[in-house]
Image (cartoon, grey):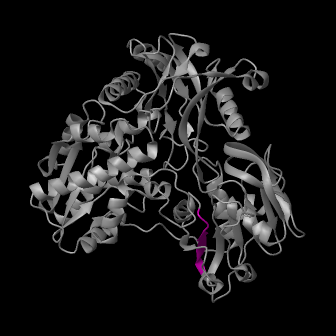
Amino acid sequence: MNIRSTPEIDDSAIAVIDLGGQYCHLIGRRLRDIGVHSEIFDSQVSSNDVAKFAGIILSGGPQSVYGKRAPTIDPSILDLGRPVLGICYGHQLLAKMKGSKVAKGRPEYGESMLTLKKGDCLFAGTPPQQTVWMSHGDSILELSPGMEPLAKTETCEIAAYGDLSRKLFGVQFHPEVGHTQFGSQVLENFSLDICGIRKQRHSAGRVERLLEGIRRRAAGRSVFFFVSGGVDSTVAFALCAQALGRERVLGVYVDTGLMRKNETVELSSLLSSAGLQDRLKVRDESGRFLAALEGETDPEKKRHIIGRLFVKVQSDAMREYGIDGEHWLLGQGTIYPDTVESGGTNAATALIKTHHNRCEEVRTLMAGGRVIEPLSEYYKDEVRSIGKEIGLADKLTGRWPFPGPGLAIRCLGRRGQRQAVQVDREVAAQFKGYEGFRFPIRSVGVQGDGRTYREALALRGPLVYDRLADLSSKICNSNRRYNRVIVEIKNKGDLRAGFVIPATLNSARIEKLREADHIVKTIMEEHDLTNQVWQFPTILIPVSFVGGEGETVVLRPVNSEDGMTASFGRLPEVAIREIAERICQSPLIDAVFLDTTNKPPATIEWE
């Protein structure tokens, strides 16, 4: 169907209403990719403000539509006669506002198979069955008159609906994320065919706009950077150098004691290839960071400690190098997912985890206009592309992402007494060939656009990736105890004899993790597999199986496009087992597991 817009309507744009979803900004990015302009509004927007747009999209969100504080929209927006597409929470809100019944349903997090009931209109050009990405706990149980179901999944009977006469549509899944197989086609069908928007060519000159924006924001001031060694901060540093001239940027690489093995040497070499090595100073602050983190186990407190200390080190460095607040700005490589997960896009957006570049002290500097973040509207894949455009080496732009807090958030701790690993008998009863073991240690997850902090379930059974993907999804969807599933690769002891031991953050445990991480990197390079995964965190958890002294390593290879969603990496079994064998040569490591959980329900990092 091809609907013509009336002359007073802007037939080139969509209004996106942010209801607190983790992926709201990503909707705009996907529309931009298909040649459609959009503007994002908060949920308080009036119907007058969105009346000129050719269509409206309602984002997802972490709330329940029947909750006391559930965000809603001006009802008159639905009387404008504009096509509306609700996504996840927006799908439920739109249906509820039109009289449908929404209630708690069977949760779905991650990959689901969508079966179409009506394959034209919203789903034109897509197959009868397709993979979609879900993140919801509520569902539509009954549609109001005029609305008809368009698609279903195994656990969600109304996974999409449409009121064709009023051009109102809803999808329970997220078409904006890269893991939804035909999501871009769904958004294109809505925008171009249903809303009648004219597709625009992608505008050129992205780097030129970035450079001009840096010059305008700097307004004659210079920029002082903390360069972490990761892609984001290095690309932002190089952009500022191009925009302002090398003499007006200064980078400081802080060795926190939480970095990968040989990280300092590698970064210096990579910056040399970009001609920026003389604009980088190295500070060894490892003792200071490790002392501040000593004894901490809480993931949010770790991130806050690191963020605050970075600001203190920045102040010390600025005094030492003669940098003042009047003539200098603090540069950061913040990208959009950092802001989203820190809960900083909307009052209704859930806090998943506070990134170190969004701690309270940094927010204060931002409020005072003393921070510049040239990449804050971009995603990881876009940052890599920008880095290549400005001439940075592939070895730098293609590096695995590494979190600003470093190994601190990959080294889990636990207070209290020893606690035994417990058998989960339901797993063996439900999933033939696998045994389940409850690990009483928690990690961060994201489910229904909200933060979870739940236990991990360990499996013992064959390393069959498709089967494990199915098990992980079903276990996390059906059991509120777990948000992460791992499978045993090698164990010097017996899973039934395992127990969690008290452990806090200290230099000895960081070094233990650093060596395991280096083994992972080395073997991946030996097998020429580094480009087969987007990121590969190595996690240390205080679970012992032999004598109570050793610990456990969890391998977390993932694939993603932008970091907002991810699937676990399915690497050759021979490489995974070789990594596990070599790590277990250390007397300090008892076992190695592989994390087989997607995002959602688990985050990429454990903390």
What residue is drawn where x is 23% and y is 38%? 286
What residue is drawn where x is 73% and y is 46%? 107
Give the prevailing secondary structure in the magenta stretch. Answer: strand
Residue 225 is situated, as x and y percent measured from the top left of the image, at 23, 55
Residue 392 is situated, as x and y percent measured from the top left of the image, at 27, 48
What residue is drawn where x is 41% and y is 51%? 355
Looking at the image, residue 510 sits to the left or right of residue 237; the answer is right
* Magenta span: 11-20
Name the one closer to the observer, 78 or 583. Answer: 583
Looking at the image, residue 359 sits to the left or right of residue 67; the answer is left
Residue 75 is situated, as x and y percent measured from the top left of the image, at 73, 79
From this view, report whether residue 386 is shown above or below residue 567: below
- Residue sitting farthest toward the bottom: 8
From this view, report whether residue 599 is shown above or below residue 2: above
Q: Is residue 130 visible?
A: no
Looking at the image, residue 295 sits to the left or right of residue 32; the answer is left
Residue 18 is situated, as x and y percent measured from the top left of the image, at 59, 68
From this view, report whether residue 199 is shown above or below residue 331: below
Query: In the rendered structure, does residue 187 fall within the stretch colored magenta?
Result: no
What residue is drawn where x is 35% and y is 46%? 404
Name the one closer to the observer, 260 or 192. Answer: 260
Name the one closer to the observer, 84 or 134. Answer: 134
